[in-house]
């Protein structure tokens, strides 16, 4: 990818801010949409606190509104799924006709709505971030652990899609920036795979007011996480994605070794923000219902989260 490739990052939070800062440090032209912190970012840049080494990038341009963002080759959308309706309606105005929109977001199903809002000439790429990070100040991102991205081209209803030059160029840019990238031939399978972890730990962290370390160290919640993982595995298989049978055990083992932190949904809950329960739990349930696959534990947790969210924002 040419050094002058122009990127926009919509959602300069814990995820978008981190990956955008990595790309900026590598010399890419970066534009960030940040309604609250644009002035601070333009003045101070973005500071990343990371076990891999702290750094600050000042070669960023932040925008407080959509109108000032120039047309970009790549638009990275890293907002919470609760903002999708508003954001998706605006992306076509800032991406080039032959450009790429990369959606880095939890859950399953959002690419369908995103693609419907864009010209067919724009390539939609799904991104799954395996990272522990939080926005800890107006211009500061604290990176705790991991940081890899899995990318996959989106085709109608998640049909397998070939890897083309635009995805290869995107991979090249991220790799040059120091981000570990994996390419998935099946974006649907990749999304289901991440839900094996996200569904139990994001949802239970809110319902039980717990960190990942607390959930994994308690026998009862450990067994509950296992049950929920088994439901996700079965729903994925019914949806045409047979995942490795040892995946849940491997994820549980990795969680034990993980630096304790609050999940993204728990951070939103603590801050009084809308919860991404529809994207994470509702999306999985919707696809499971379409294949007549029961998910009784998740159905119960979903109803509880709906109540919690309505109490926060009803």
Image (cartoon, rainbow, N blue to C red):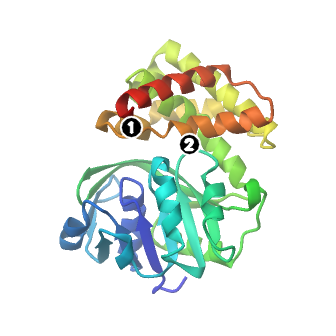
- Depicted 188 relative to depicted 225: above or below: below
Q: In the drawing, what numbered circle is on residue 196?
A: none
- Depicted 16 relative to depicted 285: above or below: below
- Which residue is at the front of the view, 8 or 216? 8
Residue 245 at least partly seen: no
Question: Please, what secondary structure does the residue beneath circle 2 have?
Answer: helix
Instruction: Tell me the crowding category of disc 2: few under 14, some 14 to 19, or many 20 or more residues within 10 angstroms, Cα based.
Output: some
- Depicted 15 relative to depicted 175: above or below: above
Which part of the image, by quadrant, shows the N terminus? Answer: bottom right
Residue 311: % across, % down: 38, 27
Residue 40 at least partly seen: yes
Name the residue furthest front. 314
Residue 109: % across, % down: 64, 49
- Depicted 58 relative to depicted 231: above or below: below
Q: Which residue is mark 2?
A: 279
Left or right, 186 with reference to 91: right
Residue 90: % across, % down: 49, 67
Residue for point 55% across, 60% down: 103
- Which residue is at the front of the view, 95 or 165? 95
Question: Please, what secondary structure does the residue beneath circle 1 have?
Answer: loop
Instruction: Tell me the crowding category of disc 1: few under 14, some 14 to 19, or many 20 or more residues within 10 angstroms, Cα based.
Output: some
Residue for point 25% across, 59% down: 36
Q: Which residue is mark 1?
A: 259
- Which residue is at the front of the view, 249 or 141? 141
Image quadrant where residue 287 sits: top right
Residue for point 24% across, 62% down: 37
Q: Nearer the viewer, mark 2 or mark 1?
A: 2
Residue 219: % across, % down: 51, 13
Residues at badges 2 and 1 in contact (C-beta under 8 Å)?
A: no
């Amino acid at each position: 990818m040419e050094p002058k490739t122009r990127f926009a990052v919509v959602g300069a939070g814990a995820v978008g801010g981190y990956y955008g800062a990595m790309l900026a440090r590598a010399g890419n032209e970066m534009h960030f949409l940040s309604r609250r912190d644009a002035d601070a970012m333009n003045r101070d840049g973005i500071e990343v606190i990371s076990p891999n080494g702290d750094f600050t990038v000042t070669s960023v341009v932040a925008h407080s509104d959509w109108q000032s963002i120039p047309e970009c080759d790549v638009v990275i959308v890293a907002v919470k799924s609760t903002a999708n309706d508003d954001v998706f309606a605006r992306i076509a105005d800032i991406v080039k006709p032959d450009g790429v929109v990369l959606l880095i977001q939890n859950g399953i199903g959002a690419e369908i709505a995103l693609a419907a809002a864009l010209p067919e000439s724009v390539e939609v790429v799904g991104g799954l971030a395996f990272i522990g990070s939080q926005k800890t100040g107006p211009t500061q991102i604290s990176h705790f652990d991991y940081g890899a991205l899995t990318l996959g081209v989106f085709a109608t209803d998640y049909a397998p899609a070939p890897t083309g030059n635009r995805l290869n160029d995107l991979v090249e840019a991220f790799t040059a920036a120091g981000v570990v990238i994996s390419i998935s031939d099946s974006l649907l399978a990749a999304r289901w795979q991440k839900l094996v972890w996200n569904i139990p730990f994001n949802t239970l962290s809110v319902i039980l007011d717990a960190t990942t370390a607390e959930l994994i160290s308690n026998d009862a919640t450990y067994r509950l996480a296992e049950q929920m993982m088994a439901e996700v595995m079965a729903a994925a298989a019914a949806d045409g994605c047979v995942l490795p049978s040892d995946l849940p055990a491997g994820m549980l083992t990795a969680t034990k070794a993980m630096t304790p932190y609050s999940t993204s949904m728990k951070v939103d809950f603590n801050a009084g923000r809308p919860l991404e329960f529809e994207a994470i739990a509702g999306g999985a349930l919707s696809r499971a219902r379409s294949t007549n696959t029961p998910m009784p534990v998740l159905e119960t947790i979903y109803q509880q989260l709906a109540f919690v969210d309505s109490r926060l924002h009803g």
